[in-house]
Image: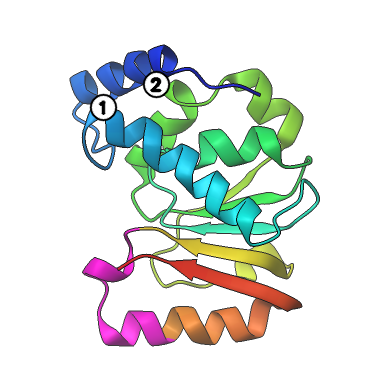
Amino acid sequence: MTISREDSARIYSTLDKSGVFSGGSQNDFHDAGENQLAILTHFGLTASSMVLDIGCGCLRGGRWLIPYLNSDCYFGVEPNVEMLEIGKKIVIDSKILQDKKPKFNTNSDFEFDVFGTTFDYFIARSIWTHSSKKQIEKMLDQFVRHSSPSARFLTST
């Protein structure tokens, strides 16, 4: 699936008018999502990989990952319910959501067992920069408990 800069610009503008934080500038909105997918594929992501997007926000990265992954392979945790709901309405086409069946949870405690599965990839983009040491430790503990044998945890700081 190709995602154009024009589509990204249109979505960014709609989010901006709605007052939703999209993670930066219009170019950042497009580039960050595209780069997230590129980095994950560099580290071995396949369409059948199970991915947990920690702090998935308005689905800036999810709009790239969800179409790429097989159905039932994308999971997102986002405590900001309003941001997530707007993302599901504006950022990703409803047909993609229906076909790919991503799963979401809005817990703010980094509890990954809510999904009842293990994951191959955990991504926490721009999360640790505003997380406490205790929250980071909790994420890492949850990674150990809910990861497949060859799982990877990717984060940015």
Q: Quick one: 92 or 37, which is closer to the camera?
A: 37
Q: Which residues are magenta?
A: 126-137
Q: Position of residue 75 (x, y in %)?
A: 61, 53
Give the structural element (helix, strand or loop) at label 2: helix
Look at the image and tell me in which quarter the N terminus lies. Answer: top right
**Compared with residue 69, is residue 78 higher up or lower down, i.e. above or below?**
below
Quarter-wise, where is residue 45 in the image?
bottom right
For residue 59, say whether it is visible. no
Mark closest to the chain's N terminus, 2 or 1: 2
Numbered circles on residues, count: 2
**Compared with residue 99, is residue 70 higher up or lower down, i.e. above or below?**
below
How many C-alpha atoms fall within 10 Å of the one at disc 1: few (<14), some, or many (≥20)?
A: some
Looking at this rendering, what residue extends furthest in the front direction? 42
Q: Residue at x 48, y 17 (%)?
A: 4
Amino acid type for the residue under numbered disc 1 = Gln
Q: Quick one: 74 or 116, which is closer to the camera?
A: 74
For mark 2, what is the residue?
A: 8
Look at the image and tell me in which quarter the C terminus lies. Answer: bottom left
Q: Residue at x 55, y 81 (%)?
A: 142
Q: How is the image coloured?
A: rainbow
* Badge 2 vs badge 1, beta-carbon distance below 8 Å: yes
Q: Residue at x 33, y 49 (%)?
A: 80
Question: What is the number of the mark on residue 26?
Answer: 1
Q: Main secondary structure of the magenta part?
A: helix
In 3D space, how far apart are the residues under numbered discs 2 and 1 (Cα atoms)?
7 Å
Amino acid type for the residue under numbered disc 2 = Ser
Q: Position of residue 44 (x, y in %)?
A: 70, 59
Residue 13 located left or right of residue 148: left
